[in-house]
Amino acid sequence: MNEYVRITEVAPRDGLQNESIAVPTRTKCELIRRLEATGVDEVEVTSFVSPKWVPQLADAAELVAMLADAKPESVVYSVLVPNEKGLERVLAVNDDTRVIDKVSVFTAASESFARKNINASVDESIDRFRPVVDLARQAGLLVRGYISCAFVCPFEGPIEPGAVTRVAARLLALGVDEIDIADTIGGATPETVERLVSCMHDRLGPCRETDIGEPCLTLHLHDTRGTAVECVRKALELGVRSFDSSAAGLGGCPFASTGGGRAPGNIATDVLVRTIMDAGFKTGVDLSRLKEATGVAQALLAGESIS
Ligand code: HMG
Ligand code: MG
């Protein structure tokens, strides 16, 4: 039987954080409904970050309250959380009904990017996450730990696999359930994916499963130079069974832009699903529903009404 590969749809977070158009909360909710109906395993719905830093997602609490009306059992909702304040906001919206299942802390393998993105050194970020991870786990939430610039940093250039692995080991020691290695600016190649995943396997053990039987290593690829598909193929060969992607290839970190250049979008979900299927694996995604959801994401970007 074909082995299952898990997919996290990140368009509502990674996509919408980087758009200059103001998207109404109800429209975000409608997009998420379409995305969850595709059969993806997880939707990263928003971020509980400082609204001064990312005004596009300032409506996070309002959006989650709206989503609470009809949260499907079958999908995991996750959000980004940079600090204790973010987690307190998540616990407040989760108070009556549990809507958010997973929180994601995020740091980097590069000091320069960590400073630009979260105004902290890597060490400071790990210290900041300690109470966040403890409290989240006490509240029964899963925790993902993102490591940005796992291959290339827009400010420092190529990143050594050892640096990423050291950050991963520290996040795992804090108690995160899952490590997400992120190619923030789309600089990975199959060779660098192999070097990094092999280094992580050698030093941290092979891709194991979390307590709830899900893969604990995820790959988050932005696709600048069209190498993301080859990177997915290589990662599948190496045992990676969890990927992030974005409908219509939306996405990009506003703090990864250099020289006026816009950060690139994530690998598109339809491209990811086809790559996984072509490699002989299966996903939960229905391609015709994904086509509809992709159309909705594209219309939204074009400023059209989608509800
Ligand atoms: P700071 O300015 O150093 O922190 O930001 P601060 O503690 O001085 O807070 C500044 C203001 O924000 C204060 O408000 C805080 O209360 C408020 P004021 O007192 O001035 O009125 N604040 C908050 N408000 C709501 N929720 C919060 C929160 N925290 C502080 N959680 C901070 C530090 C980490 C907060 C800031 O840098 C931040 O929010 N950064 C997030 C940046 C971000 O979201 N980047 C994009 C996501 S990461 C990404 O895209 C990469 C990824 O896709 C993987 C990849 O591709 O690489 C995941
Ligand atoms: Mg990203």
Image: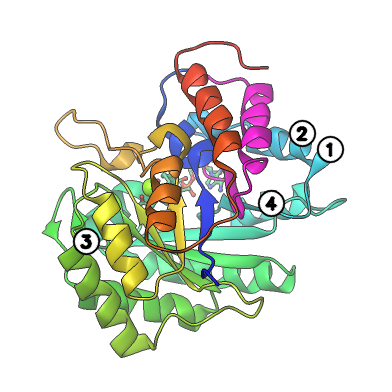
Task: Tell me which label, 1 or 3, sits earlier in the chain.
Answer: 1
Tell me whether circle 4 and circle 2 mark residues in contact (CB < 8 Å).
no
Q: Which sits in the foreground, 117 or 80? A: 80
Q: CA distance from mark 4 to mark 2?
A: 14 Å
Task: Tell me which label, 2 or 3, sits earlier in the chain.
Answer: 2
Label 3: which residue? 151
Which class describes the residues within 10 Å of circle 2: few (<14), some (14-19), or many (20+)? some
Residue 69: mark in rendering: 1
Q: CA distance from mark 4 to mark 3?
A: 30 Å
Three-letter amino acid code at the position of disc 4: Val
What residue lies at 61% left-to-right and 55% top-to-bottom?
41
| Residue 110 placement: quadrant | bottom left
* Circle 4: element type: helix
Which class describes the residues within 10 Å of circle 3: few (<14), some (14-19), or many (20+)? many
Q: Is residue 251 magenta?
A: no
Label 2: which residue? 66
Count of marks, rendered view: 4
Q: 61 left or right of 160?
A: right
Three-letter amino acid code at the position of disc 1: Asp
In front: label 4 or label 2: 2
Task: Tell me which label, 4 or 1, sits earlier in the chain.
Answer: 1
Tell me whether circle 1 and circle 3 mark residues in contact (CB < 8 Å).
no
The x, y position of residue 71, in whole percent, is 78, 45
Label 4: which residue? 90
Task: Tell me which label, 4 or 2, sits earlier in the chain.
Answer: 2
Q: CA distance from mark 1 to mark 3?
A: 40 Å
Residue span colored magenta: 22-50
Three-letter amino acid code at the position of disc 3: Phe
